[in-house]
Amino acid sequence: MLPLLLAMLLGAALAFQGLLGNDLDLPLPGPVRGPSGAVQPADRPRPATGGPAVLARSMFAPVAGPASEAGSGQGPLGAYAVVGSIQVGRTAYAVVRAQDSSTFRAKPGGKVGEWRIQAVTRDEVRLSRGGERLTVRFGPSGPFTVTATSGGTQ
């Protein structure tokens, strides 16, 4: 009996909404009590606005650090910058930004320029080129850092 009553109530509400159409004006956002109108209280923060530079910036672009040098072609990865990691299923990928601001993902064993990706974790990407080793750190472990070690040449 209750499902039938609820179905009838839902049908009546749907019919009422159909009769009203789009003529229903919702109240302005703000406190429930108090003066009505478009006046915002002094304790309400102003809405944040982002300028064109903020809106045009890639969400993968680091704020500071050596990875931003790589975008200019001056970093250790040349025209590429490792800017993060992502896990799809059981495979972790490095998120890489090219000099033209395009992004792509590369899994361990893949190449970024002349460097081969050895390992990807949530905090770092380890790369190698010949006897050289490069670690790009990011994420919760701290600021963006790049450390490079050079072994023998192979």
Image (cartoon, rainbow, N blue to C red):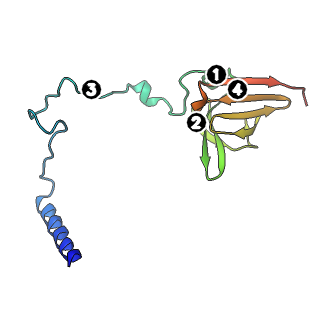
Residue 100 visible to the viewer: no
> Where is residue 26 drawn, in percent x and y?
15, 46
Residue type, numbered disc 1: Pro
Q: Residue furthest bottom?
A: 1
Label 4 SS: loop
Residue type, numbered disc 3: Pro
State which quarter of the image contains the C terminus: top right
CA gap, disc 3 to disc 1? 35 Å
* Residue under pointer 4: 78
Label 2 SS: loop
* Residue under pointer 2: 102
**Residue 114 versus residue 148: which sits nearer the camera?**
148
> Where is residue 146 drawn, in percent x and y?
68, 24
Q: Is 12 located above or below residue 26 in the figure?
A: below
At x 90%, y 27%, the residue is 153
What is the crowding at mark 4: few (fewer than 14 residues within 10 Å), some, or many (at least 20)? Answer: some
Q: Residue furthest left?
A: 35
> Where is residue 99 drawn, in percent x and y?
62, 29
* Residue under pointer 3: 45
Residue 126 visible to the viewer: yes
Q: Is 56 located above or below residue 9 in the figure?
A: above
* Residue under pointer 1: 66
Residue type, numbered disc 2: Ser
Task: Tell me how many marks there are.
Answer: 4
Residue type, numbered disc 4: Gly
Cβ–Cβ under 8 Å for marks 3 and 1: no
Cβ–Cβ under 8 Å for marks 4 and 1: no
Cβ–Cβ under 8 Å for marks 2 and 4: no
Task: Please tell me which of labels 4 and 3 falls first in the chain.
Answer: 3
